[in-house]
Image: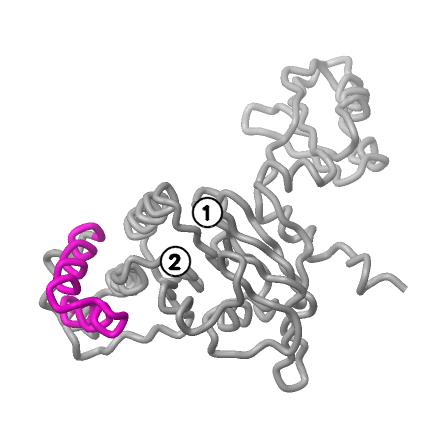
Amino acid sequence: MLTISALSKRLAAVQALDGLSLDLRAGELVGLVGASGAGKSTTMRLIMGSLAPDAGSLTWMGRPIDAAARRRFGYMPQERGLYPRMTVVEQLTYLARIHGLGARAAAESAATWIERLGLEARRGTEIQRLSPGDQQRVQLAAALVADPELLILDDPFSGADPLTQDIMSQVLHERARAGVPALVSSHRLEVVERLCDRVAIIRQGRLVADGTAAQLRASTEPRWRAVVEPEPRAVPHDPSALASLPHARAERSAEGRLILTAGGPDEQALLAVAQRLGTVRELGPVRRPLDEIFREALAAPHPDKDSP
């Protein structure tokens, strides 16, 4: 549905995007993650037309994105754009009207999203008097009120409390089941992992990894974990015993057991070390958190850019 092809953009002296390519399919939730300044917001501003690309193309349903297509997109910018003195219902009704809905349809849509996002008790409250979490709910409602075909959400969970995060995530999953794709940027990697079907990691304006969380884990070196019950006659634990293993770490549990972790193609090297230290009670793979994979992706040399 949405196709980003070799997109480049320079902002002053900074190459914000450098040949970025990415696609979104119907009903797909894609997390766009990267360090600050990686190009996430620039990508979204290019999609929404507030910036023009220097090179590359953007298409929606196989056709170049124009103003008519963008009217069918729902956008939640990083710089929040709500009118502080408008009430919640006034804000949403107004935004629905400027997107082309008639008076009755605009009022009905505003009421629907106020109810769905748990804002009934705040419908007559001015935006400036809302809590940060409630303001985030209104921002999402503003992106949804015109029944968009695509959602572009720039850091939507910023300032959102856990309950608000859950409600917003439920709504995005509902829209995805209805076929509406969403591109979601966030620094909250645990939220991205729970929410999104795919994760795209960008660095210095380039895509460095793209796939499901499981695929990203499978593309990195596995980690293994052994839990060892020390035995009186076992060789005393020597930290240097793990020195030959990559990413090795040892710690002792409250019960006195040794917990060893290390990388490697399989668990055999770690097992050999563990068996010299006592009885191996547990041995298996470690489910690596997404933030660890994210840091590795940002640190790894890029084949086209960082190599000599």
Helix, strand or loop: magenta stretch: helix
User: Which residue position holds label 1?
Assistant: 26
Quick one: quadrant of the C terminus? bottom right
Residue 204 picture location, percent across and down:
67, 67
Q: Residue furthest bottom?
A: 12
**Residue 56 is at least partly visible in this image:** yes
Identify the residue shown where x is 59% and y is 71%: 37
| Badge number at residue 231 | none
User: How dense is the environment of label 2, judged by Cα within 10 Å: few (below 14), some, or many (20 and up)?
Assistant: many
- What secondary structure is marked by label 1? loop
**Residue 186 is at least partly visible in this image:** no
Q: Residue furthest front?
A: 63
Q: In this picture, which residue range is highlighted in magenta?
A: 88-117
Identify the residue shown where x is 64% and y is 46%: 293
Q: Is residue 53 magenta?
A: no
Looking at this view, is 278 or 213 the one in front?
A: 213
Q: Specify whether 208 is left or right of 140.
A: right
Closer to the N terminus: mark 2 or mark 1?
1
Q: Is residue 223 above or below residue 118?
A: above
Q: Is residue 87 above or below residue 203?
A: below
Residue 128 picture location, percent across and down:
21, 75
Of the residues shown, which amino acid type is indicated by label 1? Ala
User: Which residue position holds label 2?
Assistant: 157
Identify the residue shown where x is 66% and y is 80%: 14
